[in-house]
Image (tube, rainbow, N blue to C red):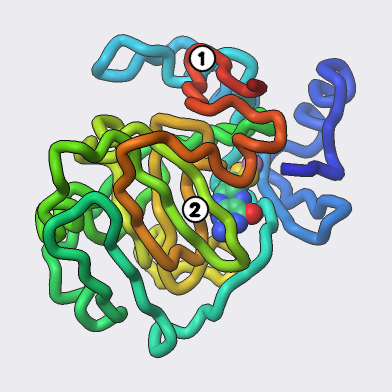
Amino acid sequence: MSDGFEPSMSRRAFVRSAMFGTVIVALGGGSYVLASEDEERKARADKRPDGRARLPPGQYLLKRIRPMGGTEGDPSPGGFRLRVHGEVEQPFTIDFAELLKMTQVDRVCDVHCVTKWTALDTKWTGVKLADLAARAKVKPAARHVIFEAAAGYTANVPLREALAPNVIVAHKYEGVPLARAHGAPVRVVVPDLYFWKSAKWITGVRFVASDRPGYWETRGYHNHADPWKEERYG
Ligand SMILES: Nc1nc2c(c(=O)[nH]1)N[C@H]1C(S)=C(S)[C@@H](COP(=O)(O)O)O[C@H]1N2
Ligand SMILES: [Mo]
């Protein structure tokens, strides 16, 4: 969540006009690309099919997602195991090959980071979380989903929102295998909540009856994380 590049509005405007379209290398070493003023203006005016603003309040626009760090897991597909468990009738663990045998979907969606960048039309390939839930036969008692990832990272999402058709367990970004920094070999994408809910280096999906605030939710961030309500801090 930390960010070596947090310009004030005026400084950001300066940087934007001087540097849009160019790669900026942040203090942490990750690089990212600002969208042009024109693209940002368009996004601000645009509405989603559900009527919400394309650019949620307080957000600015990047051309693509920016690596935000975190403690990486084993990036090799060969080492990948995903455990689907908790309030389910048929818990299971699948490896990378088995994940690829499930129905694959492409999703194009906007993602919004609490550090205020948004990337539009990001393309992800993977398996719907709803398909994993159906395979495990989630019990009626389940109310929340806990994403479990490398080094003990977790993120909680209400069950109803986790089962939305745009929530996927992704192994490709923009048509190519996930980069290590973005969660290789497999991450979650929950586009309609701030991006910290989208656990990288995923190891488990746990269905629970009572909520369990995760890594950032227990460190001052909002339990729900709706970008249109600016649910940034708890
Ligand atoms: N396992 C794990 N997943 C994680 C994180 C993390 O530290 N560990 N950081 C989260 C945060 S704060 C953000 S903003 C997004 C960033 O994803 P990106 O680096 O692909 O942009 O990943 C989320 N998923
Ligand atoms: Mo973040």
Q: What quarter of the picture does the C terminus occupy? A: top right
How busy is the neighbourhood of tag 2: few (under 14 within 10 Å), some, or many (20 plus)? many
Q: Looking at the rendered structure, which numbered label has been put on residue 199?
A: 2
Relative to residue 45, is residue 105 drawn left or right? Answer: left
How busy is the neighbourhood of tag 1: few (under 14 within 10 Å), some, or many (20 plus)? some
**Residue matched to label 1:** 44
- Residue 225 or 15: which is nearer the viewer? 225
Label 2 CB sits under 8 Å from any ligand 1 atom: yes
* Secondary structure of residue under mark 1: helix
Name which residue lies at 53% across and 28% down: 223
Name which residue lies at 30% across and 44% down: 167
Name which residue lies at 78% across and 27% down: 17
Label 1 CB sits under 8 Å from any ligand 1 atom: no
Q: CA distance from mark 1 to mark 2?
A: 27 Å
Above or below residue 161? Residue 145 is: below
Q: Which three-letter amino acid code belongs to the residue tagged 1? A: Arg
